[in-house]
Image (tube, rainbow, N blue to C red):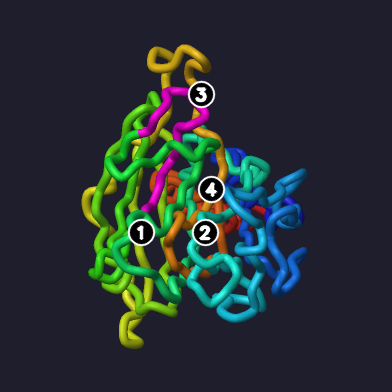
Amino acid sequence: MKHLRSGLPVFLLAALCPGALSFAQTTINFDSGYTAGSTVVGIDDPSLPGTAVWTNLFTSSSYTTASSSSPLSGSLAMTIDTSGTGSGAGNATGARIDMAGAGVTFTDPTQAVRFSFSMNIESMSLGTGSQLTLSFGAGDLSVIGNNGSSVTTDYATKYWWGIVVQDTGAGGVMNFYRSSASGNSGQVTNIGSYTSFADLGTYLTFDIVIDPVAKTFTSLTLTGSVGGDVQSTTIAGIAGTTVPWSFGSLNTSNPGADPLQFFRAQVGANDLVKVHFDDITLVNIPEPGTVALLAALAAAVPALAARRRRRA
């Protein structure tokens, strides 16, 4: 009976809350499988199961490299450099990777989806448009315009979220985009300037959480350091807004299709940007109701164990 008693908490959690003990998580931190100074394009990331190769966007892949100059953790980060100090000056460039193999579910009501990544803008030119564009979900370049619209209704262009950084002399104005369910329009929220949350040359971490039941964003949290003061800010206006699920009536080519799971980072033509990325993470996390249930079970386990001991 000792073995049954010692395994009781695990048994209860597994029986009453299936999946609660195994939340999928994948983090790309560039420390394994990458070579400092070499392009990330063509690298099959070893942290993602199956085949997950970084592919090139636009011009030469030599402008998107694994760099040892400014990692957040470990020894390497991904760097896009068109700042004028390297051969890629002023070129449109970037890379994308399919994270569908991460094992993260977007449909389990007990598990929210959290996407986080850290970005360090070292330098950025002024006033030339959308210098830096990031997105998750889109398989197509055309998904995000400056007005939040896309040029096609094909299901592959739907995206979970997009972030556009524009340096208009105000420290890197950032806009957060959400695709509509059909993929042919979007919503945009200004989330402030990069330098309001992090000094240039330091990392700003983005945490984006999606509720799979309500199919809405739960939160967008930014964590950075300004003048050495570390701060974390949750952006108002993001929670409760819908993410681009289609329920069948809005798309004739693939009704009900969710967006793809590509993470992409790109710099526009004629823009002089040097930016680093690290710790790109896609993870399932327990929904609040699941957390409450786990807490209640944890509180009940000692009493149940004591009762069994008294009966023994």
Q: Residue at x 32, y 35 (%)?
A: 149
Read off the residue under disc 3: 257
Do residues under tags 2 and 3 come within 8 Å of each other at their CB atoms? no
Residue 48: x, y in percent?
Answer: 70, 51
Question: Which element type, helix, strand or loop, lies under badge 2?
Answer: loop
**In the image shown, does 98 or 83 lie closer to the viewer?**
83
Among all residues in the image, which is located at the extreme bottom?
228
Callout 3: 10 Å neighbours few (<14), some, many (20+)? some
Secondary structure beneath dot 4 equals: strand
The residue under label 4 is 284
Q: Earlier in the sequence, mark 1 or mark 2?
A: 2
Name the front one of labels 4 and 3.
3
On-image quarter of the C terminus: bottom right
Answer yes or no: is residue 9 visible. no
Q: Tag 4: residue type?
A: Asn
In the picture of the structure, the residue carrying the numbered disc 2 is 91
Residue at x-position 60% and y-position 42%: 19
Which of pointers 1 and 3 lies earlier in the amino acid sequence?
Answer: 1
From the image, state whether disc 1 or disc 3 is nearer to you: 1
Q: The magenta stretch spans which residues? A: 150-164
Q: In which quarter of the view is residue 105 placed?
A: top right
**Secondary structure beneath disc 1?**
strand
Query: Mark 4 near mark 3, Cβ–Cβ under 8 Å?
Result: no
Between circles 1 and 2, the one closer to the viewer is 2
Q: Which residue is mark 1?
A: 165
The amino acid at mark 3 is: Ala
Residue 71 lies within the magenta run: no
